């Protein structure tokens, strides 16, 4: 998810060139209703039910973290063992984020208040308010996927980039910029963007006007109190092992998925997941631990479906839409991400804004 689009709207909301909104070229797209109607007959009705068994992940990840912290604080461990504990905590925190994602879509338990209570704790390692997340992800992103200046996760066009000094600085951190610092992007960006949006951007960007700011502030403040209490409990001497290492690991895992979900895909006006989204496969164990989050085209078609069933949708998409469905191994998607720039010349062409090299998006290059 990328701060680029958020910042540009905030600084130039009334002065954005209309060409940015018209840069999306004609594409053979279909809407979500089409895919719902086309795919549903091939799927069992129970796939659309809530799956409370996913709470098993929630409890396992939290208990696992508590056990790891207890071990780190109770035994005289060597540095390597403490680093391993930090790595495992980062993996568990990433898992909690994937559970939070499903909870917020309502695919695990019913009751928005109960969902938000659970997410308040499971997203605490990232300092992400449940209300903020619902508005950002469910409403803005799912409602406007890859629609430039409407989807806060979509990268900008060349004209937007040229008119923002801030974006010219941010670009150097992004995959495909050919800058050494871009290899740190996965390790911090998700938390950095979320934090900046919650403490600053939401107050200076009309995109966030309809969000419940009071509730976000309360939830965000509670999570900050949790973090401060946690840091005090573990002690300064353990911060590198029990805070910083988990922080970098959990961000890497999430951003390595999030960036491949859409950042190789075309911009679209019509929300067509087979055009503007990409599914990535991984090792079976990692897919299990990451709740099948990589099957993202499937998720955008059926956002309220449990991730336990998205691979069933994957099989149907391969058989019914084999020519248009975009999926590949995650490692290959990351390689492509770092081999292409992140700024759009037009809807199906990416451009490096400094050396002017152009690249086709995955949908365009496959046709």
Image (tube, helix red, strand yellow):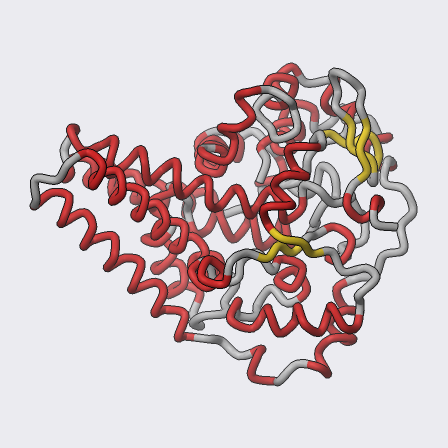
Query: Residue 64 falls in which quadrant of the image?
Result: bottom left
Q: Position of residue 170 (x, y in %)?
A: 59, 22
* Residue under the point 84% across and 34% down: 346
Judge by depth and name the residue closer to the eye, 303 or 326: 326
Across and down, in percent, residue 314 comes to 66, 68
Quadrant in the rendering for residue 289: bottom left
Number of dots carrying numbers: 0
Counting from the top left corner in percent of width and height, residue 356 is at 80, 20
The residue sitting at 33% across, 40% down in the picture is 246
**Occupied quadrant, residue 148:** top right
Residue name at image x 59 percent, y 35 percent: 2
Q: Nearer the viewer, residue 136 or 154?
A: 154
| Residue drawn at the location 80% of the way across and 48% of the way down | 363
Q: Image check: 279 left or right of 107?
A: right
Q: Position of residue 96 (x, y in %)?
A: 38, 55
Q: Quadrant of the N terminus?
A: top right
Q: Residue furthest right?
A: 26
In the displayed structure, 245 sits above or below 91; it is: above
């Amino acid at each position: 998810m990328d701060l680029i689009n958020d910042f540009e709207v905030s600084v130039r909301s009334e002065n954005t060139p209309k060409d940015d909104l018209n840069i999306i070229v004609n594409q053979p797209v279909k809407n979500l209703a089409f895919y719902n109607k086309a795919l549903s007959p091939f799927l069992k009705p129970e796939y659309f039910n809530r799956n409370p068994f996913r709470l098993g992940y929630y409890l396992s990840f939290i208990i696992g973290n508590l056990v790891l912290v207890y071990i780190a604080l109770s035994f005289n461990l060597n540095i390597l063992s403490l680093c391993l504990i930090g790595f495992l905590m980062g993996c568990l925190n990433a898992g909690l984020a994937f559970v939070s994602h499903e909870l917020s879509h309502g695919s695990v338990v019913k009751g928005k208040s109960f969902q938000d209570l659970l997410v308040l704790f499971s997203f605490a390692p990232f300092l992400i308010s449940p209300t903020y997340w619902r508005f950002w992800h469910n409403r803005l992103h799912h409602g406007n996927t890859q629609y430039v200046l409407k989807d806060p996760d979509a990268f900008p066009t060349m004209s937007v980039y040229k008119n923002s000094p801030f974006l010219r600085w941010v670009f150097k951190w992004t995959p495909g910029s050919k800058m050494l610092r871009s290899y740190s992007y996965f390790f911090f960006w998700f938390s950095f963007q979320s934090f900046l949006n919650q403490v600053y951007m939401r107050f200076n960007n009309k995109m966030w006007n309809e969000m419940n700011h009071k509730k976000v502030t309360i939830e965000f403040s509670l999570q900050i109190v949790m973090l401060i209490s946690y840091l005090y409990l573990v002690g300064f001497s353990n911060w590198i092992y029990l805070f910083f290492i988990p922080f970098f690991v959990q961000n890497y895992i999430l951003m390595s998925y999030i960036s491949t979900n859409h950042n190789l895909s075309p911009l679209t006006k019509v929300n067509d997941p087979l055009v503007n989204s990409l599914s990535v496969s991984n090792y079976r164990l990692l897919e299990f631990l990451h709740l099948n989050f990589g099957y993202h085209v499937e998720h955008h078609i059926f956002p309220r479906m449990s991730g336990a069933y998205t691979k069933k949708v994957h099989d149907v998409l391969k058989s019914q839409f084999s020519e248009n469905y975009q999926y590949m191994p995650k490692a290959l998607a990351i390689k492509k991400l770092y081999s292409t720039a992140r700024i759009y010349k037009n809807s199906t062409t990416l451009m490096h804004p400094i050396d002017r090299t152009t690249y086709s998006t995955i949908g365009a290059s496959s046709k």
